[in-house]
Image: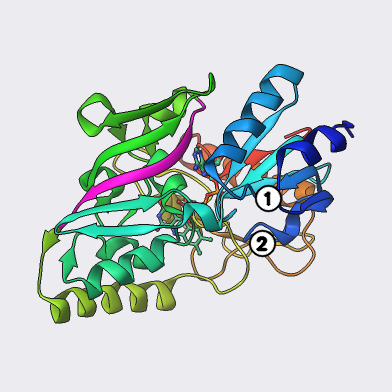
Amino acid sequence: MLNCKTGIEELVSGPFMMKEPMKHHTSLKIGGPADYLIIPQSQEELEKLLLFSRNEFIPFFIMGAGTNLLVSDKGIRGLTVKLEKPFRHIRFDRERVTVGAGASLPMLSIKASRAGLSGLEFAAGIPGTAGAAAIINAGAYGSSMSDIISSIKVLTWQGEIKIISSRELEFNYRYSSLLEESWIVLEIGLDLVEGDYNKIKSRMEELLEHRRLNHPIEPSAGSVFRNPQGKSAGKLIEEAGCKGLRVGDAQVSTKHANFIVNLGNSRYIDYLEVIKKVREKVKNKFGVLLELELNMVGEDS
Ligand SMILES: Cc1cc2nc3c(=O)[nH]c(=O)nc-3n(C[C@H](O)[C@H](O)[C@H](O)COP(=O)(O)OP(=O)(O)OC[C@H]3O[C@@H](n4cnc5c(N)ncnc54)[C@H](O)[C@@H]3O)c2cc1C
């Protein structure tokens, strides 16, 4: 473990955690200790932490709600920085919404619906933060963040604040060109449209009901694999006979084959083994190599 406790104490006003088990901070409930888990209390603190890590050559990892992470059992070295309260603002100005990177996406879609604004219905059931959703272009049911993003405010690795308009960004399936830069998303500008509250609400309920019926309730990180061009990863996995495949407490969900769930005490290596087996079986049966959608993080990942 890197020893930089004193340096961190001088930079942050709130408490921070040392050797904090990441399984307490991920929806999968897997993951070893983060050397330092810090929740900055202001943008200024975040900027200082980034500068500190750069100057001292300490690894820096930014996270939101941990709903798309598979963290190794050895955990994460250096600083793990989680965006929470000071980054959760949501401001409406007619059809324009400005949202902090740490705001919950489901909460944002509820607030937008109450304001009579349409465009975020698809996001009602996507757990996690707006910042992560923007950078990975999260989406569902034929819509994605790129449909509504007008600009993204970032903190660059050099400590500069930039506002980038959507015209300057490239978006694709679970991809934005910001992923190439390892910048931190601070705030997102969204363009929604006026709509009928009852219609928006009923569409959100319909999509949430679809999730309730088709997604597992056990801890997961959402879809494990990206859909190959024109194909459904879940269908390929199911047809390769992988539903229910289990190693330790990691199991391909019996409800939706593109979810690998933690049945209780799954270790990282069990989870990896299931991923490996699924990939092998799908490759052997269909000649398709599945790519990961979830983010693998930590030592040895
Ligand atoms: C039950 C379930 C259902 C899901 N359904 C969907 C779905 O329908 N569609 C979909 O797209 N996803 C889905 N997901 C995956 C996940 O919810 C989304 O990818 C979500 O956007 C991740 O947000 P997060 O805050 O949890 O990010 P994290 O898991 O904390 O981080 C994910 C990645 O984003 C980076 N990141 C986080 N915050 C920032 C920031 N401020 N600046 C820069 N980088 C950042 C992290 O470094 C990491 O690489 C689902 C997950 C679960 C558990």
CB-based contact (under 8 Å), mark 2 and mark 1: yes
- Mark 1 or mark 2, which is nearer the start of the sequence? 2
The residue beneath circle 2 is: 251
Residue occupying image coordinates x 86% and y 36%: 6
Range of magenta residues: 182-192
The N terminus is located in which quarter? top right
Please give left or right for residue 146 compared with residue 78 in the image. left
Residue 214 among those drawn in magenta: no
Task: Evaluate whether residue 125 shows in this view.
Answer: no
Q: Position of residue 56 (x, y in %)?
A: 76, 20
Tell which of 59 and 226 is nearer to you: 59
Using a 10 Å C-alpha cutoff, classify the residue at mark 2 as few (fewer than 14 neighbours), some (14 to 19) or many (20 or more): many
At which x and y percent is residue 57?
A: 74, 19
> Could you tell me residue 215's position as x and y percent?
47, 70
Residue shown at the point (78%, 37%) measured from the top left: 10
Q: Tell me the residue that label 1 is attached to.
A: 274
Secondary element under disc 1, as helix, strand or loop, is helix
**What colouring does the structure picture have?**
rainbow
In the image, what residue occupies the spot 17% across and 65% down?
Answer: 117
- Tag 1: residue type? Val
